[in-house]
Image (spheres, rainbow, N blue to C red):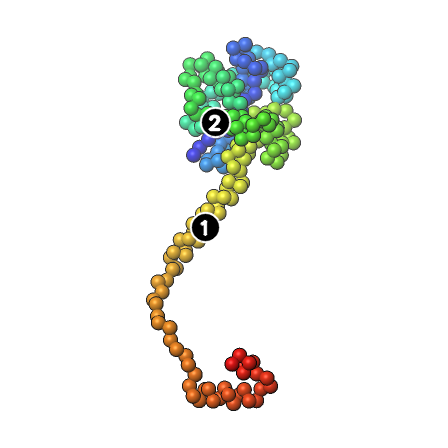
Amino acid sequence: MKEIVLDTETTGMDPNDGHRIIEIGCVELDNHIPTGRHLQLYINPERDIPADATAVHGITNEFVADKPVFSQVYSEFMDFIGEASLVIHNAEFDMKFINWELKQVGHAAVPWSRIVDTLGMARKKFPGSPANLDALCRRFGIDNTQRTYHGALLDSELLAEVYLELLGGRQHGLGLAAERVQSSANEAQAATRVERVFREPRSYEPSAEEQAAHEALLEKLKDPLWTKSA
């Protein structure tokens, strides 16, 4: 099962106010395991990046000045995500930007049915607790010390680990492994089971000669146990 963990960085909070995407980061999962394939796109937003936005993600106007615009890279982005489900933290924010940008280039929107929102998963699993990415990394013991700024690719890599933990993490995997081991043991036991044939109990009474030899032995022993039990 292919999934794409995705994050974006933008110039602001709302595309309807003229803000645009400036970075897209994607990490591919196959059956919840990173495949090593990833995509990172820096995009010229064709507008200025406010200082308060740069303070969050560290991306400056100078850095994106020579980067391609969205219309030049969206096909690469769409080819990478294909028809996979998209795993996003606070998906409502990222998807409103992605679908706004896609609309500008005449491409169909990505339907919500393809979205897995890890923010909703975290709030359901830990009601009342902080559910931002940093808080979840702390909860699950995931190293996020490199996250001095928000970055789309780095955040996608961290989110992939958080997503695994929200699904059950290592304990979930170990549980499945234990089930497989137990199943194999049961199969092996069934395969080696032998049908036993009932036999009547047999008598093993000593002969007269054996009895006489035993009594002769007892006479040589001091205070033998057999005479006491008798």
Question: Percent x, y for residue 36?
Answer: 51, 35
Q: Nearer the viewer, residue 179 or 5?
A: 179
Report the residue marked by disc 1: 182
Residue 77 visible somewhere in the drawing: yes
Q: Quadrant of the N terminus?
A: top left
For the image shown, how many numbered marks are present on the structure?
A: 2
Identify residue type, mark 2.
Val
Residue 76 visible somewhere in the drawing: no
Report the residue marked by disc 2: 116
User: Are dots 1 and 2 in contact, CB under 8 Å?
Assistant: no
Eyeballing the image, is 19 above or below 58? above
Question: Percent x, y for residue 219?
Answer: 55, 89
**Quarter of the image where one finds residue 165:** top right
Nearer the observer: mark 1 or 2; the answer is 1
- 1 or 2: tag closer to the N-terminus: 2
Question: Percent x, y for residue 183?
Answer: 43, 49
Q: Residue at x 44, y 14 (%)?
A: 103
Q: CA separation, marks 1 and 2? A: 32 Å
**Quarter of the image where one finds residue 146:** top right
Q: Nearer the viewer, residue 60 or 225?
A: 225
Identify residue type, mark 1.
Gln
Residue density around tag 1, few if under 14, some if 14–19, many if 20 or more, within 10 Å: few
**Quarter of the image where one finds residue 9:** top right
Q: Nearer the viewer, residue 176 or 8?
A: 176
| Local secondary structure at mark 1 | helix
Residue density around tag 2, few if under 14, some if 14–19, many if 20 or more, within 10 Å: many
Q: Nearer the viewer, residue 134 or 229?
A: 229
Q: Residue at x 47, y 27 (%)?
A: 116
Q: Residue at x 43, y 28 (%)?
A: 84
Question: Percent x, y for residue 180?
Answer: 45, 47
Eyeballing the image, is 109 above or below 147? above
Eyeballing the image, is 195 above or below 46? below
